[in-house]
Amino acid sequence: MSTIQEEEILRALSTVQEPDLKKDLVTLGMIEDIAVDAARNVSFTVVLTTPACPMKAQIKEACVNAVRANVPDAASVEVNMTSKVTSSCSHHGGNHHGGAHHHAEGHTCSHNQPLKEVKNIIAVASGKGGVGKSTFAVNLAVSLAQTGAKVGLIDADLYGPSIPTMFGLLDTKPELSGKNLVPLEKYGVKLMSIGFLVDPETALVWRGPMASSAIRQFINEVEWKDLDYLIFDLPPGTGDIQLTLAQTVPLGGAIIVTTPQDVALADVSKAVSMFRKLDVPLLGLVENMSYYELPDGTKDYIFGHHGGEIFARTHSLAFLGSIPIDRSVREGGDSGVPCVIAHPDSSSSQAVKRASMEVARRVSITNAELGGE
Ligand SMILES: Nc1ncnc2c1ncn2[C@@H]1O[C@H](COP(=O)(O)OP(=O)(O)OP(=O)(O)O)[C@@H](O)[C@H]1O
Ligand SMILES: [Mg+2]
């Protein structure tokens, strides 16, 4: 019997589709480290584009089956699964999505832009206030960090910073490294908030230009270093801060948070159209405080069912998930221990984690569609 050639293995693996990205693993550049030993044992690595990919097991099995079926001489097949988060900007090394190196219209990135070591910059936004943006942004950041991703979180709500409270860091000040600030770090997430720098009363009297320059400082004068995801927790609505952000950094995507009561309001559509006008890809919609879970597990949709899903569909947005209204979610925010840390197995934490993994998945799909790496 002749030895097994690498090409045979690649040909076999080119029959395996990545279910989300709708191309085969070889075209997507996801296969690395192919090896065949003297006893014809085959091994290779599959580099997925999201940590904790829900389809990991399925993809692994498909790879084993494809090699068994197409390379009958293989004595055994060993598949190592790893991940490397893709970037919304093409200057990052990493996976090659079908050799597509162009950018979608309006989505420009350059080498000397700010935050060039950050792979994906994501904004969490809403039409109106108090819908749970900060709560979701915090739990999203922590959930992504728990999967092994490098994550940062910027509190862009300069007039009502909530990150210091939600992380239990009310009396902590960031240190300086040269001229730059070193972000604080908790639960595996790098953090920056105006609340770490000035007392809240001071921030309240700021006017537009000062707020915009504070945002620029958070971007340019903080040592974020390399991150897979940098999440911006935005203030509600469609004001100066949203505009400054979209004009200063290459936003890889925005998430819209609503409650069932406010999906019908014009504010949500306004937020959606603002990001569309600014050419920021919309990752999808999260419906927060969707239902109340009774002790027997029944879901009571107090404010009606499917409002968020219908809104998402009519606005061509992905629906990222529903999060129940739950005392422990609020208590997590107040106590400085996010619910996904304090009660990781509760059904509300599970809902938050599912929505977070859906965000990671949409980021990876959006990057593939827009031709990032
Ligand atoms: N799923 C939930 N269940 C229970 N309470 C929640 C839930 N989500 C958020 N809350 C609570 O609702 C309040 C508002 O949430 P949060 O501060 O996250 O909203 P926001 O959209 O960031 O508000 P703002 O527009 O003021 O920034 C907080 O007290 C928070 O703890
Ligand atoms: Mg907030």
Image (cartoon, helix red, strand yellow):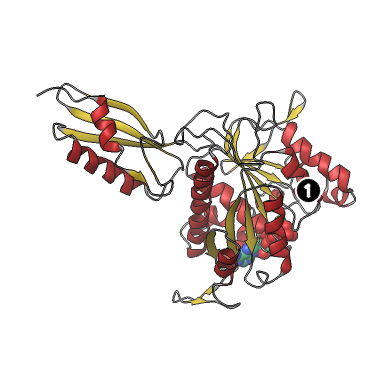
Q: On screen, 261 above or below 320? A: below
Residue at 18% over, 34% down:
71
181 relative to 357 in the view: left or right: right
Give amino acid for label 1: Ile
Across and down, in percent, residue 27 comes to 39, 35
Across and down, in percent, residue 6 comes to 26, 26
Residue at 77% over, 47% down:
243
Q: Quadrant of residue 262?
A: bottom right
For the question of whether residue 312 can be seen, the reply is yes
| Category of crowding for the residue at label 1, using alpha-carbon neighbours closer than 10 angstroms: few (below 14), some (14–19), many (at least 20) | many
Disc 1 residue: CB within 8 Å of ligand 1: no
Q: Which residue is mark 1?
A: 241
70 relative to 88 in the view: left or right: left
For the question of whether residue 174 can be seen, the reply is no
If the image is split into quadrants, where does the N terminus sit? top left
Q: Quadrant of ligand 1?
A: bottom right
State the residue in front, 209 or 153. 209
Q: On screen, 7 above or below 303? A: above
Identify the residue at the far left of this view: 1
State the residue in front, 214 or 361. 361
State the residue in front, 303 or 277. 277
Q: Count every numbered label the image shows and give the total.
A: 1
Q: On screen, 260 above or below 118? A: below
Residue at 62% over, 51% down:
138
Q: Quadrant of residue 68?
A: top left
Question: What secondary structure is found at the residue carrying circle 1?
Answer: helix
Q: Quadrant of residue 23?
A: top left
Across and down, in percent, residue 61 comes to 27, 45
Across and down, in percent, residue 319 comes to 54, 61
294 relative to 116 in the view: left or right: left
